[in-house]
Image: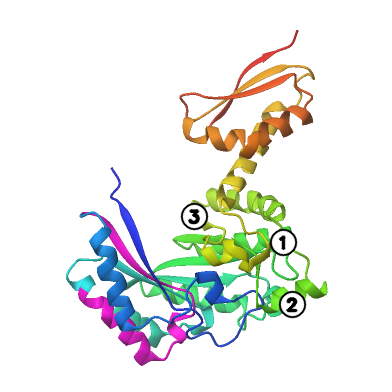
Amino acid sequence: MKSRRSIIPVFVPHLGCPNDCVFCNQHRISGSLTPASPESVQSALEHALELIPPGTETELAFYGGSFTAIPPLEQERLLGAALPFLNEDKISSIRVSTRPDAIDKTALDRLKSFGVQTIELGAQSMRNEILMLSKRGHSAQDVIDASALIKGFGFNLILQMMTGLPGDDISDAEYTARQICDICPDGVRIYPTVIVKNTALHDMWLSGAYQEHTVEDAVCVCSQIVPIFEEHKIPIIRLGLNPTEDLSGGDAVAGAYHPALGELVYSRILRVKMSHLLEGIAAGSDVTIGVHPSKLSQAIGQKRCNLNVLRAKYSLKSLKITEISCGTEEIRLLSIAKL
C-alpha cells in the first residue's frame, strides 16, 4: 500500500524573477498577493500539520517566483524557517521552483544544506524562438545545462512545459516533449497557456497579435504529447493550471483554463484508441467496448461526448462502453452486431 502524501504550498509570487514573461502574472495565477516570509512559512506549516493525519508523507513546496534568484539571505531565512520541521521529521521534504538561468553550484550547495530534495525548473519550451517571443530571458541550452547540474547534485528534477505560447504549434510542443524526455526528469508539469489579466499576453490578444490557445486546442495538443511522456515512463504531475478563486472569478480571461483539463485530455486519448478499434466496422452496427472500471468515465467522455462523436463518425446504430476486468490501459472490442 502506498503511503499518503500531502503538499504544503507556500507561494513566493514574482520573488526573484528578473523579468516579466508575456504570460505571467504570478499574483493572479497563485492567488497570493503577499510574498512569503519566515513567519508565514512557519505559520503555514503549523496550521497544515494540525490537519494532516499522522503517518502522511508531507512536503513543503515553494511555488511561484524563482526561488534561487531571490537574494541568498532571503532564501536562507525562508528555508531556515522550515528546517526545524524537517529535522524533527514533521515534514518529509522541501521543494522549490525556479528558472534555468538561476541555477549554479553555489545555489545548489545552499539548497542542499537546507535539506531541499526537489527542484522544479520552468523550461516552458525547448525552441529558442518561442522562448524569445515569450520573453523568458533564457535559452533551451540553459534548461539542458541546469538540469544536468541539478541531477549531478542528486536532486529530484521536475520540468515544466507550456503549450500554446506565441509562435508555438503542435509540432513545437511535440519537439519540446521529446527534448524533455531526453533530459530524463523525475516528473513533468504541462501548462497550456491561459490569458491572464494584466499581462503582456492579454494586451497581445486584445490587439490581435496573439491567437487564443483554446481549451479544445490544448486538448488536441496535450493528447498528442501525454503519450510521449508515458512512453518514456515520465510521470505527469499536473496538467493545466490549478484552479483558484481569482482565475475562476474572471482573471483567466481566455485560453486553456478548465478545472478538469486533465480529464478532458485523457478522455480524448481514449477516444483516439477506441477509434482505432472501430475502423472498418460496418455502418449500422451495435458495438460494445470494454474498459477498466477506473477508465469508464473518461472513456464515455464529458456529457457523453466520446460516445456521441464515435457513434456519428462510424455511423453506428449504438455504441456502449462498459467496465470489465482488464488492465488499466486495455480497451477491448467486446461485441459487434448488425441486423
The residue located at (46%, 86%) in the rendering is 69
Disc sitting over residue 34 in the figure: none
**Does residue 229 sit above or below 246 in this rendering?**
above
- The answer to whether residue 115 shows anywhere in this view is no
- Residue 152 placed where, x, y %? 40, 73
The amino acid pointed to by label 1 is His
Is-magenta flag for residue 266?
A: no
Query: Magenta part of the protein: which range?
Result: 55-84
Q: Earlier in the sequence, mark 1 or mark 2?
A: 2
The residue located at (74%, 77%) in the rendering is 203
The amino acid pointed to by label 2 is Asp
Q: Which residue is mark 2?
A: 203
Front tag of 1 and 2: 2
Front tag of 3 and 2: 2
Q: Which residue is mark 3?
A: 234
Q: Quadrant of residue 268?
A: top right
Q: Which residue is mark 1?
A: 213
Depth order, front residue of 4/121: 4
Do the residues bearing badges 1 and 3 touch, measured as CB atoms within 8 Å?
Answer: no
- Residue 58 placed where, x, y %? 29, 61
The amino acid pointed to by label 3 is Ile
